[in-house]
Amino acid sequence: MTRVLLRASAAVLLLLSSVLIGWRVLGPAERLDTSAAPYPPLVVSSPGVTGRINVAPLIFNDRLRIYAAKHQLRADEPVYGKAVYTSRWSLRRWPEQLSGVVSTGTTVVSRWSDGQLIGQDGRTGKILWRTSGPDAPDYAGHRTGAAAVWTPPGLRVAAGFVVVTAGQELLGYDVSTGAERWRTTIPAGCTDGFTTAGGVYVCATGAYDAASGRPMPDWPAGPFTAVGCPVAASVCAGFRDAAGHGWLTSTAVPGRAAALDRPDATVAAGVVVSAADGLVNAYGPDGAARWTWAGDVRVLGGSSTQVLLLRPDHHLVVLDAVTGRPAAEFRLAFGKEDDLWEISGLQIAEHYLAIERRRPDAPDDPESPIYYYTTDTVLLAGF
């Protein structure tokens, strides 16, 4: 009888141990690792490729790189590093999935599948605030995380607000505190719009003040094509309306810009730039011609002072936005890489560029093993 009791007790203990181990491994958990290290100074690299990595970074104030994974948000440094390094800070949540990430100023805001919005100091990783919102889409960043940091679903920033879409709700949260300031009902076709530099959320069916959620009167008719968006379809410098008319958006009320009517035109470094027929033409906000540069290129975008162009042979050309004079030119390749790739996503920061590359004949599904150009498919460059 004693042996039976001992065996039964051992079995119960073994079962309890298994349950405890399973709970520790699979149970809900959150881990935050912050940094007390000095914030790195701004370093402007010489023009050229600085590295290649296997994940897409959100370039944070030209000092850090922030990465998204299914259950983790993390940052490393330096921004010009050749590889991915030990995390400076990280936030891991389980079983919640990271839906998207945006940043503004020194604040990084992440949205999670359980509806949590978490604001962190991007320099240290310290949590500044958190608030509960509508459930968010699951992680869809695929192998590199690019979709979560460069095109986060239903997550935008503008005018000191985080703008969230969920179904037919549009919500605005204060970036500094996380407090919900407003919410409004929107038509079904108003999800995943963009925000303007003038502080307006724009979707196919209308426009809303990002600070109050109130509809904007006398807005052009959509759907719209946003142009000049640094990242996350946020703070866009202009758009084209349903009629193909171009508008600049430095203020809440858009200003007509006929030079932006061309389908190939965009806004870079405060000027309207178009590239066609071997010429790059730049125009001021008033439509006056600024400069012309000869070359067969595609306009990638720009920083506050420079325009970035891509040649068919994958050379990056950097022009001064005021004069149109070349500031730099170099081949976008790490070492002896070939040119058999296309751009599938990118971010242009003030002094650095990150490009996610795919194969020219790649299938549409990023989960395909033959979608990305290489294992280290993200190219980093300074300019």
Image (cartoon, helix red, strand yellow):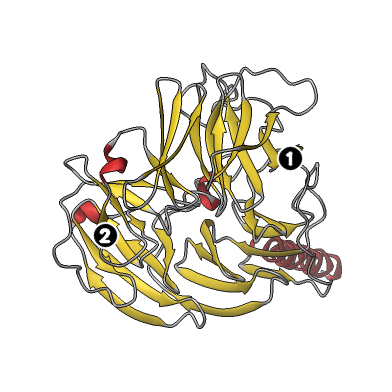
Q: Residue at x 44, y 68 (%)?
A: 115
* Amino acid, disc 2: Pro
The one nearer the camera, 108 or 24, is 108
* Residue 67 horizontal side relative to residue 4, left or right: left
* Amino acid, disc 1: Pro
**Residue that label 2 marks:** 254
Q: Name the quadrant containing residue 76.
A: bottom right
Q: Residue at x 60, y 27 (%)?
A: 372
Q: Which residue is drawn at 45% across and 21% down?
A: 278
The one nearer the camera, 371 or 215, is 215
Counting residues from the start of the chain, the first of labels 2 and 1 encountered is 1
* Quarter of the C terminus within the rendering: top right
Disc 2 + disc 1, Cβ < 8 Å: no
* Quarter of the N terminus within the rendering: bottom right
State whether residue 307 appears in this view: yes
The one nearer the camera, 25 or 159, is 159
Image coordinates for residue 298, horizontal then vertical, percent = 48, 29
State whether residue 367 appears in this view: no
Q: Distance between the residues labelled 2 and 1?
A: 35 Å
* Residue 334 horizontal side relative to residue 227, left or right: right
The one nearer the camera, 128 or 262, is 262
In this rendering, the answer to whether 28 lies above or below 256 is below
**Residue that label 1 marks:** 47
Mark 1: secondary structure: loop
Mark 2: secondary structure: loop
Q: Residues within 10 Å of mark 1 (few under 14, many from 20)?
A: some
Q: Residue at x 68, y 26 (%)?
A: 374
Image coordinates for residue 122, horizontal then vertical, percent = 66, 68
